[in-house]
Amino acid sequence: MIAAIHSATEKSLIPSHDIAATILRVIDRILDWMGLSHQRNLEEIVYTAIILGLSLAIGLIIRWVIIFLVKKFVEHRHSAAMEQLLKMHTINKCTHFITPMVFFALIPFAFVSDHHTLDWIMRIVGVYTLITVAIAINAVLEFAWWRFDNRDNRYNHPLKGVLNICRGLVWIIIFIISVSILIDRSPMTLLAGLGAFAAALMLIFKDSILGFVAGIQLSTNDMLRVGDWIVVPSTIANGTVIDVTLSVVKVQNWDNTVVMLPPYTLVSTSFQNWRGMYDAGCRLVNRDIYFAQASIQPMTPQLLERIVSAYPLMTDYVKSRQQAKARGLGNEYNNWDKPNGTIDTNLGLFRAYICTYLLKHPAVNNSQFIIVSLDPATEYGQALNIEFFSIYTAWAPFEAVLSEIFENIAVAAPVFGLTLSNSPDGNEFTVRTSPQPGQTSIGI
């Protein structure tokens, strides 16, 4: 068999024949020592097992050496990219192809006469090599995506779907080439035959195709980013987007549950994205409070004096309205940057007080509109609508400011002679019934 190797290597460019001849000589000596005859089949089996172990050993050694050198580089340079390479095992995944390449270089010398067996071994090892190449390419793509997503993706576009598409394309190409190697046909012939299964493939990969199209629309139109707070009315999703892939959008609700949504759902239906609120740096407050209709009264000098004494910030407003009234002028109707109200009724002055209070509040954004207006009365009483923008967008500070402002409004209302209404409330009321002959009316 060694002679056959030398005769074969005279026409071969593979430089590994010396190693193969050395291994075969060792095998012959081992067989002689064990008292076994030099059977070609036995030699081929032992040779294949030895080069398989040798290939694995060489691959592991090279992998350990490369990883060791990278770790030393990271220790001296403290490179974030290199540290991420180690965390993502990118280098480890990129060195898997070394083992089949070594096996490729040595296996032909074991079957110099049995070409049929050698052909099938080469096909199987070729498919395995393609798989290791696909793993390496996907590892590089994943690292490249991480690098871009952390350095250049300033707008936090959902690019993981693009990564998944690239992964899928790599595996599809590897699969087609692998099948063509196993059946010994051209990949183009195989692709031509796939046309008959196009309808079945579209049905099988329907969700992936819809997700791919939806992902492009979401990214191109900047409809969604990782970290956005979204509300999808047709689902229970109400929280922060934590991941966007080819087939699913993960939303973490405020109760820490995770809702899975197909990307196509966000394109085919409407959803609310709160990113604009965060970008603007202010958050809208729109709330109604209700007053008992009977507590709305004309303003009296005694009540006006009591209000100014309790809230000195209303002094300038009250004086300006009294002077305008003395000159026969009507009420002013200002823009949102000045208080609107009247001194004719206690509710009108209360509207002016709320405007003044909000304009001077440090947590209220004065560059946005501030509107205090009456809504139509309901069974709960007279509705007073208050709209303004808080400078806080985060949940906890926003709710704290909201509570502080409406607590102050609730405490100030009785000073203006206004009664907050509840349904049912504790106000006294009278029910009268028509008396029967000989009876008096009953009052409750």
Image (cartoon, rainbow, N blue to C red):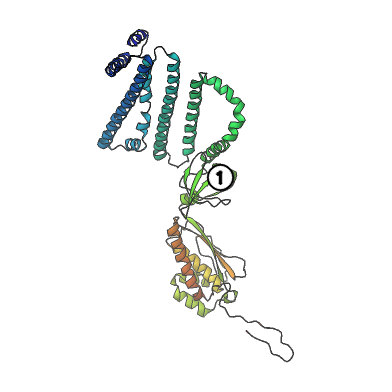
Image-based side of 97 in relation to 389, left or right: left
Look at mark 1 in the image and give the residue it sits on. 266
The quarter holding residue 360 reads bottom left
Quarter of the image with the N terminus is top left
Amino acid found under the numbered disc labelled 1: Leu
Quarter of the image with the C terminus is bottom right
| Residue 159 seen in render | no
| Residue 135 seen in render | yes
Image-based side of 148 in relation to 262, left or right: left
232 or 401: which is nearer to us?
232
* Residue 297 in the image: above or below residue 114: below
Q: Which residue is drawn at 48% across and 78% down?
A: 305
Q: Position of residue 35 (x, y in %)?
A: 29, 17
Looking at the rendered structure, the secondary structure element under dot 1 is helix
23 or 438: which is nearer to us?
23
The crowding category of the residue bearing disc 1, from other C-alpha atoms within 10 Å (few below 14, some 14 to 19, many at least 20), is some
Q: Where is residue 85 in the image (x, y as percent from the top left)?
A: 35, 35
Q: Which residue is drawn at 59% across and 46% down?
A: 269
Q: Which residue is drawn at 47% across and 26% down?
A: 174
